[in-house]
Amino acid sequence: MKILNFGSLNLDYVYSVDHFVAEGETLASTVRNTFCGGKGLNQSVALARAGADTLHAGCIGPEGDMLTDMLKSAGVNTQYVRRVDTPTGHAIIQVDPRGRNCILLFGGANQCTDPAFADEVLASFGAGDWLVLQNEISSLPYLIKTAKAKGMIVVLNPSPFDKSLIAAGLDRVDYLLLNETEGKQLTGYDAPAEILDAIRATYPSLKVVLTLGKDGCVYDDGSERVSHGIFPVTAVDTTAAGDTFTGFFIGAVSKGASAADAIRRASAASAIAVSRPGAAPSVPTADEVDAFLACNTPCQAPEI
């Protein structure tokens, strides 16, 4: 069993600011750092650091060596990363004193995935292998359809959300991991229970993980609904919180962990990540998560 993450690869330009820039405002930042990022790269790093056998597929431009170096250093197989002439994707990220962020994306090379490249990569995978996807690359509907036809287990993090995702074939997805904002965009509902019930009514076989920020998270697969509270930490940078959660959750369930154990472990990993600056560099190792769980207690789980 292999886990293929076919996902984005970005250079993150992170600016520390007193507050997010408003319309018409010019604001000086206090610090600028460049990190490896992209939801795809972050999730591959998290998967590998969680102990999963992880391969990454995607596209980088001429200046993307920093990204493949990061993947390799985390233990990710990069044989399916293709270099193209298009500039590498990047993000401009503002981080405020409370650790909150806002992000502007430029797709760049991430939009160079076409069906031919998808077929070339997926030829090496088959039934029982896992495919992890986000919404930062092109040809997403084709990847979902082709992987499902091969019997792969398909995981989708629908971020950033747009209506095209509904037409991408969510009925072919096995696991959907999304936050409450994306849940509202998908269903039109605000309350977590209503979001989950609406998804269940439309996609009865879908396994759903809904993250709720400070209110924790909840897993629902139609037969059980399990909630988990957050681990209280001081937030420094929330940029890779969701990606860390996704990687550690999938890393756990792919090895046979229960949903309850998987969301507990993912919640701990996410808590560690938000206490550190940067995206991929903030993702903890499995040993760090073990140590954290040994001496930290979560807040009460939300009632959904």
Image: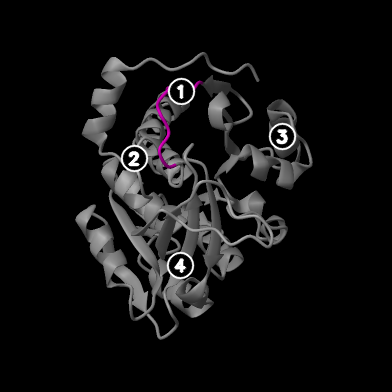
Distance between mark 4 and mark 2 Cα atoms: 20 Å
Mark nearest the camera among 4 and 3 is 4
Residue type (three-letter) at the residue carrying disc 1:
Ala
Residue 1 in view in this figure: no
Mark nearest the camera among 1 and 2 is 2
Q: Tell which circle, 1 or 2, labels the residue nearer the N-terminal end.
A: 1
Q: Is residue 272 above or below residue 25?
A: above
Instruction: Identify the element where label 4 is drawn.
Output: strand
Task: Kindly indicate whether the residue at mark 1 contacts the one at mark 4 (C-beta within 8 angstroms).
Answer: no
Distance between mark 4 and mark 3 Cα atoms: 31 Å
Residue 276, which numbered label?
2
Q: Is residue 50 left or right of residue 121?
A: left
Distance between mark 1 and mark 2 Cα atoms: 25 Å
Q: Determine which residue is flagged by label 1.
A: 260
Residue type (three-letter) at the residue carrying disc 3:
Ile
Q: Which residues are magenta?
A: 229-237
Q: Residues within 10 Å of mark 1 (few under 14, many from 20)?
A: some
Task: Kindly indicate whether the residue at mark 2 contacts the one at mark 4 (C-beta within 8 angstroms).
Answer: no
Q: Determine which residue is flagged by label 4.
A: 90
Instruction: Identify the element where label 3 is drawn.
Output: helix
Q: Is residue 84 left or right of residue 138?
A: left
Q: Position of residue 211 (x, y in %)?
A: 56, 34
Give the residue at x 56% y 61%. Answer: 104
Residue type (three-letter) at the residue carrying disc 2:
Arg
Instruction: Identify the element where label 2 is drawn.
Output: loop
Q: Is residue 33 above or below residue 191?
A: below
Mark nearest the camera among 4 and 1 is 4
Distance between mark 2 and mark 3 Cα atoms: 31 Å
Query: In which quadrant of the rendered view does residue 290 lie?
Result: top left
